[in-house]
Each structure stands twice: as structure tokens, then as C-alpha cells.
Amino acid sequence: MPVTKDNETPFIAVKQGLRRKLVYTENLMTVINEFYDGPWAEPEPPHSHPHEQTAYVAEGEVIYYCEDEAEQHLKAGDMFSAPPGKKHAIKCLTSIVRIVDSFTPIRSEFLEPEGSRI
């Protein structure tokens, strides 16, 4: 998958309010997560994973929560990272939030056909 063009790559519906696009190599994955059901009254449940993660807020505003750290109010143009094994979560503050995540190693569970292309 050497090139992924936005207008040629469909979103994959993950669950109500979340769809994503992705591109990956053997050891690195970039994921565009689009949340379209905000703003939220509560944050998503905290989660952790063994992957290194960096994230860029491309659109919207969120509160970012990371274990043992102060919550952060982030807006378009801001970035954050989530260390492996550390619980973290977001709360969407706007109707649409688009976050571009990078993971290493790749999130193989994202490659499984869990959603539908839209």
C-alpha cells in the first residue's frame, strides 16, 4: 500500500460515531480517526496498548487524558503522545474531531475487517 489518496480511499466504519482510514508499512501505521458524534458528555473509556503512539489533532477540540498526567485541552494543530502500556483517553468537545495517529509497531487489529467501508 505505497500510496493512499484521500479521494480514492474509503473510510472504514468502526462503530457509531467513528470512522477511519489507514496506511501502513511493516513497522509503522498512520490512522486518520474521524469522530463525528460530538461533543461528548463523558470521555471514552481509558485504554492502553503495547504500541508507541503519536497523534496530531487535525480538526476540532478534545480533552486528552493520560495516566499520571494532567488533562490537556487540545485543538487543531496540537499534538500528543501515548507511551506503551499507559492508559489514555479523549473527550470530544466539538461535533467533528479528526486525529491523525501514528503507531509502531502497526495495530494489526485495525487490519481485521471489523467495520464496513463507507
Image (tube, rainbow, N blue to C red):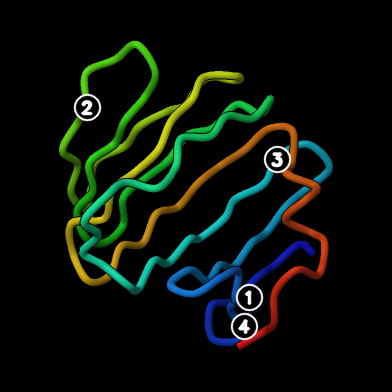
Q: Position of residue 49 (x, y in %)?
A: 64, 30
Nearer to us of marks 4 and 2 is 2
Give the numbered dot on residue 78.
none
Choose the circle earlier in sequence order: 3 or 1: 1
In this rendering, the answer to whether 87 lies above or below 10 is: above
**Tag 3 secondary structure:** loop
As drawn, the residue found furthest toward the top would be 68
Q: Residues within 10 Å of mark 3 (few under 14, many from 20)?
A: some
State the CA–CA distance, disc 2 to disc 1. 29 Å
- The residue under label 1 is which amino acid type? Ile
State the CA–CA distance, disc 3 to disc 2. 27 Å
Choose the circle earlier in sequence order: 4 or 2: 4
In this rendering, the answer to whether 42 lies above or below 87 is: below
User: CB under 8 Å between callouts 3 and 1?
Assistant: no
Residue designated by label 4? 10
Residue beneath the point at 74% across and 41% down? 106
Q: Residues within 10 Å of mark 4 (few under 14, many from 20)?
A: some
Residue designated by label 1? 12
**Tag 4 secondary structure:** loop
Residue designated by label 3? 28
User: CB under 8 Å between callouts 1 and 4?
Assistant: yes
**Tag 1 secondary structure:** strand
Residue designated by label 2? 71
Residue beneath the point at 67% across and 59% down? 23
- Quarter of image, res 71: top left
